[in-house]
Image (cartoon, helix red, strand yellow):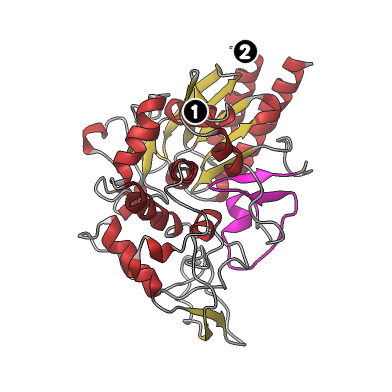
């Protein structure tokens, strides 16, 4: 066992011993070569399920960078434009909208709800008509104002009969939390479902078919699919409270959180991004599309951070070291709170799944822990620090 592998193993085992995580899979690549791949422990929601290096995880919001890449392919081919109105692809989005703000004296209920506490009173809002239409750019960059994590939104309920097309159509007159383009706030469960539907309309094929032919098959991501396939139940990490949610439906391709994948499969996608759209010498994405994904797309709009504990709350804040591109958060300058170097980009899934592309050190890091929430953040950061130390030493 190499020094890096031993250090990662020690970090994960210590976190398991403290009950922080049940286990997990960690993968590290440098220059396209596997440096370390290890699996530990069991599923948080089923201790009988032993995690292996080939375990399939519902990767949740790590789906979003993949969906963004699909959209960027269409953009690079001229079949989609950033400033297109969403209503050009989804007619229901041409309806007038309102922007709402909390009335004085009201606050949002705590998120997540405090166990044992009675439900908080529903807040009341002042409303004004929205001045701007939602565009593809707004959806890609989370500046649309439509559905904010941690804020009760009263969106239409998604029924078991809903398709991606039928559910997204229901969002046509949903209220906005802010005027499009003026703020960043994470539309964790809605924004990229809309993007998936836009991809369908712009491409003329289903979102899964587009993803399969343009990314999954070219990259050899043979263990990656939308939804929890019962045929792979013995390989799939149990989802616990997310098992019966729409993101687990094989017939509902959620661009927000619907992909199921392995660490090795996802590393192929991340490596393609690191290599500027190339995979094993063949072009999968246009180089300029990959650059756009990892470029600051917010400008002066405040970004709330790259960790769940930073962005999953209704109170707006600003973390000046970070910004957002299309589908990924970016470290735009070195931060004392982060070991990763400037230019690193990636995203997480429910706080416990996370990947990084680190151009400065030619690294890919994939960390898949089986639980939910912020508890895995310190573990991720320890692993990130260990990998960066090792990579810097190896290149000195």
Q: Secondary structure at mark 2?
A: loop
Q: Is residue 306 magenta?
A: yes
Q: Quadrant of the N terminus?
A: top right
Q: Position of residue 320 (x, y in %)?
A: 75, 54
Q: Earlier in the sequence, mark 1 or mark 2?
A: 2
Q: Which mark is residue 2?
A: 2
How far apart marks 1 and 2 lie (CA) works out to 20 Å
Q: Which residue is mark 1?
A: 267
Q: Quadrant of the C terminus?
A: top right
Decide: is 273 above or below 240. Answer: above
The percent position of residue 59, horizontal first and vertical second, equals 43, 41
Viewed as shown, does residue 93 lie left or right of 9?
Answer: left
Point 49% across, 70% down: residue: 133
Give the side of residue 81 with respect to residue 261, left or right. Answer: right
**10 Å crowding of disc 1: few (<14), some (14-19), many (20+):** many
The residue shown at (48%, 31%) is: 269
Q: Which stretch is magenta?
A: 305-332
Between 312 and 40, the one lying in front of the other is 312
Q: Is residue 226 visible?
A: no
Say if 365 sits above or below 189 in the image: above
Q: Horizontal placement of 129 versus 104: left or right?
A: left
Q: Is residue 352 magenta?
A: no
Task: Depth check: give the residue in front, 202 or 368.
Answer: 202
Picture coordinates of residue 199 (x, y %)? 38, 49
In the visual, does 208 lie left or right of 389? Answer: left
Residue 174 appears in which quarter of the rendering?
A: bottom left
- 30 vs 107: above or below: above
In the current view of this chain or complex, which residue is farthest to the front?
78
Above or below, 211 relative to 122: above
- The residue located at (75%, 16%) in the rendering is 395
Residue 129: percent from left, percent from top: 51, 83
């Amino acid at each position: 066992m190499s020094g890096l592998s031993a250090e990662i193993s020690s970090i994960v085992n210590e976190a398991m011993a403290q009950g922080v995580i049940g286990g997990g899979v960690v993968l590290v690549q440098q220059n396209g070569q596997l440096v370390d791949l290890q699996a530990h422990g069991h599923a948080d929601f089923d201790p009988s399920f032993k995690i292996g290096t080939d375990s399939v995880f519902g990767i949740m919001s790590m789906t979003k960078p993949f969906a963004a890449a699909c959209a960027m392919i269409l953009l690079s081919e001229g079949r989609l434009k950033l400033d297109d109105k969403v209503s050009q692809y989804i007619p229901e989005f041409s309806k007038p909208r309102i922007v709402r703000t909390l009335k004085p004296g009201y606050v949002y209920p705590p998120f997540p709800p405090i166990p044992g506490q009675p439900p908080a009173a529903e807040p009341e809002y002042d409303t004004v008509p929205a001045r701007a239409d939602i565009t593809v750019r707004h959806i890609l960059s989370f500046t649309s104002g439509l559905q904010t994590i941690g804020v009760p939104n009263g969106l239409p309920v998604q029924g078991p009969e809903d398709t991606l097309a039928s559910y997204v159509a229901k969002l046509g007159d949903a209220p906005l939390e802010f005027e499009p383009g003026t703020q960043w706030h994470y539309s964790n469960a809605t924004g990229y479902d809309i993007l998936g539907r836009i991809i369908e309309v712009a491409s003329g094929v289903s979102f899964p078919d587009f993803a399969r032919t343009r990314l999954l098959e070219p990259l050899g991501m043979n263990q990656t699919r939308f939804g929890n396939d019962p045929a792979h139940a013995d390989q799939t990490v149990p989802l616990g409270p997310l098992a019966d949610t729409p993101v687990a439906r094989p017939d509902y391709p959620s661009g927000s959180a619907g992909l199921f994948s392995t660490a090795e499969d996802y590393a192929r996608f991340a490596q393609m991004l690191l290599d500027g759209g190339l995979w094993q010498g063949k072009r999968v994405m246009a180089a300029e599309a990959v650059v756009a994904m990892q470029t600051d797309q917010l400008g002066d709009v405040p970004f709330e951070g790259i960790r769940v504990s930073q962005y999953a709350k209704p109170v707006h804040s600003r973390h000046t070291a970070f910004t957002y591109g299309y589908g990924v958060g970016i470290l735009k300058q070195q931060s004392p709170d982060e070991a990763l170097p400037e230019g690193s980009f990636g995203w997480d899934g429910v706080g416990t799944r996370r990947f990084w592309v680190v151009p400065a050190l030619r690294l890919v890091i994939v960390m898949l822990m089986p639980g939910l929430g912020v508890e895995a953040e310190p573990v991720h950061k320890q692993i990130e620090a260990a990998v960066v130390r090792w990579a810097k030493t190896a290149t000195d």
